[in-house]
Amino acid sequence: MDLLENLSEVQMEAVKTIDEDLEIIACAGAGKTGVVTRRIVNILASKPEILPENIVAFTFTKRAAEELKSRIYDCGKAVLGHTRGFAHMYVGTIHGFCIKMLQENSPEFQKFSVMDEIHTKLFVERFYEECGMQDLDMRKYTETSLFVSVMGILNENWFEKDKWDAKTQLAFEKYQSKLYEEKKFDYSLILREM
């Protein structure tokens, strides 16, 4: 298998990029998975000192990660003649990687579970007063999505906490405190803790 076969110039450049981090953004059907697959196999073929366990590839969804893993195995077998060590390569979402690292390296997070957007909304509605939503004069059920979005943005910008008004700081502290108390992660807290 020729790793550069049927690729555009930009795609070839991405596949040949060995010693730099690379972010590939393109529309659906543009060939991202094929380019990432070929790049990973090219790295392993070009630099035998790089082990599969030292490669991390993030995708947006779990489904995309499964497709990418499958293609990497097939391409690796065709180009390298083997897939030794491929099971130790991380291919998945950034949130999955972060939770894996946190739970492997920080004992206090081993019992934490991750809530998706729907479960986060249900969590906030269940603990409406304790989560700080009431402190921001937001209405339960009708403004829950807005509250969750605001908490996510604040969690990603926690280092600017001194610029927030007192009500916002209180609500944020309550929300975060309740998450820790219940041993829950929302997506933004995973990234912050990492």
Image: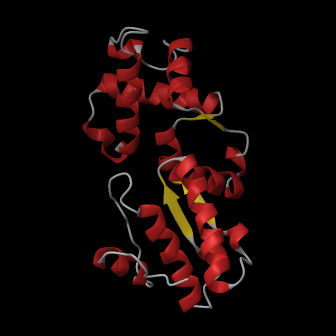
Residue 142 shows in the view:
yes
- Residue 79 lies, in percent from the top left, at 61, 83
Q: From the viewer's perspective, is 153 left or right of 128?
A: left
Residue at 52% of width from left, 24% of height from top?
Answer: 118
Residue at 63% of width from left, 29% of height from top?
Answer: 181
Residue 97 shows in the view:
no
Number of marks in the rendered image: 0
Q: From the viewer's perspective, is 187 left or right of 107?
A: left
Which sits in the foreground, 37 or 181? 37
139 shown above or below 63: above
Looking at the rendered image, the quarter that the N terminus falls into is bottom right
- Residue 83 lies, in percent from the top left, at 71, 76
- Residue 162 lies, in percent from the top left, at 29, 40
Q: Residue 150's quadrant in the figure?
A: top left
Residue at 41% of width from left, 62% of height from top?
Answer: 32
- Residue 109 lies, in percent from the top left, at 67, 45
162 shown above or below 119: below
Q: Residue 49's quadrant in the figure?
A: bottom right
89 shown above or below 189: below
4 shown above or below 48: above
Which sits in the foreground, 85 or 189? 85
